[in-house]
Image (spheres, rainbow, N blue to C red):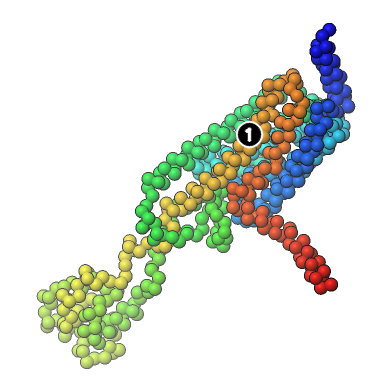
Amino acid sequence: MEPSAWRDASTRNLTHDWDSVNQTYFSCYHPLVVEYRYFAVLWGCLVTITGTVGNLMTVLAFATDPCIRTRFNVLIVNLALVDLLYCALLRPVVTDSYLHLRWRGGALGCRAFGLLLYVTNAVSILTLCLIAVSRYLLVQRRSTFERLFSARGLLLLLPSTWALGLASYGPLWPVYVFVPLVCACSFHGTPYTTVLFVLYFLAGLFCVGVFYLLIYRRVRLAARAVLRHRPSRRSSRKRVAPAAGTEDDSGVGSGGGAPTCTSEVDSQGEPPAHRAGATWYKEPGEPQPTRSALDSHTARARASPEESATTPSATTPPALTPPSTTTPPTSLPSTSPPSKTPPSTSPPSKTPPSTSPPSKTPPSTSPPSKTPPSTSPPSTTPPSTTPPHATQSSGGDELKRVTRMCFAVFLCFVFCFVPFMLLNMADQRGRAPQILHMFCANLTWLNSCINPLLYAVMNPQFRRSYHLLLTRAFSPLGRLWRALWNRSASC
């Protein structure tokens, strides 16, 4: 026998013996992974700490910050709970198995670990599908979104994701075994597991990608429509005040008491001045004309006709003072008292100002066209509120920002799991190096800790909530450090 053939045969026999021993004693020992395990242990510790802290902060931020306590963010919290369970409970167990290169939890613990592992993966995929569907309905069918993702609808949808995942992978309880290639507990390929793989990973992720593609097309068409109908810069400068009482994408109003909360979509769709029951606001410094003001102006007109001739009335419209010169002078004594009568003796009700213009007031000296009245009609003084196109533009920007964040979460999930899935499909007989299987399996750990980082980078509200939580958490340490520093300085 040739030396190379003898070496290959001995290697195959040794590998077969290792596989049988590993399966019997829950060991994943291999000479090629002895040095790699230290990298896996370091990577597992980093993922455990980062994922546990980040997902816990996401849950606490939702519970303490009213700005992000929306119906849509309930889906984000459900995804955070899945990752928190994975990082805090499952990941330390796998890290321990990599450190000792064997499973130390027994057969029952191996089955429980495999069940929880695939249930959390199923819930993550179902939650990503719900997030994509909610974003699509929000931009395409708002009424359907309000009905499906209402408070009652979420109470049914979220437990359904956990129940469906448990019902899908619960029947596999007897077949969960220790897999030495990845140094963790999983199951061997069966027709049922193949169907689950196709339904959850292939069909589920494909549907999520299709929904985000439809969202992208819809947002792009809306952006083009806004650019076509964008008003001029001069007209947009006159309407700068924001509209109060907008609502977020889940239908929960942000309210005027929380000015820092941004809204994704204004469900009202128009400024308050155009809604039912609203009145037009007057310009600053412009008084509201009353009956007493009309009476006092009438008295001043009777007392000094020359002054009233040069200063037109602020409340009398131009139509009531026509420039007519055919009024006979004999009608003046019958409708107005003599000029010697003081203004206070004549009751305002007996001397209407519109029926008898003074004789010394020439109508041609103050034409209505040259001296317009001070009161402006409602059509020329719009209220200082945000116009509908401005509200929709700001809501559209927020909608695109949140949609990009959700799409980034989906892309990270695909990036973490696709290499592992492709390797399992291509190497069903286990001929690939064990270190390659371990590396692809370790890459899937990243998905459980990267989502809070995406929220902090791409969402200002989550970033502000994280900063507030960290400030509150480290404030006692800061006070303790200052006290120790002051004591050492005094000594």
Q: Residues within 10 Å of mark 1 (few under 14, many from 20)?
A: some
> How far across and how far down the image is residue 231, in percent?
37, 52
Q: Residue at x 40, y 46 (%)?
A: 227
Tell me where residue 14 appears, x and y as whole percent: 85, 19
Question: Which corner quadrant holds the C terminus?
Answer: bottom right
Apparent side of residue 7 relative to residue 55 in the rendered image (left or right)? right
Residue 95 image offset from top left, x and y in percent: 80, 37
Residue at the (73%, 58%) spot, across then down: 473
The structure residue drawn at horizontal position 20% and vertical position 75%, both measured from the top left corner, is 366
Q: How many marks on residues?
A: 1
Query: From the viewer's perspective, is 256 left or right of 14?
Result: left
Please provide percent x and percent y for residue 258. 57, 60
Q: In the rendered view, tell whether residue 431 sits above or below residue 301.
A: above
Residue 443's quadrant in the figure? top right
- SS at mark 1 in the image: helix
Q: Which of the pair 357/32 is nearer the observer?
A: 32
- Return the residue at label 1: 414
* Residue type, numbered disc 1: Val
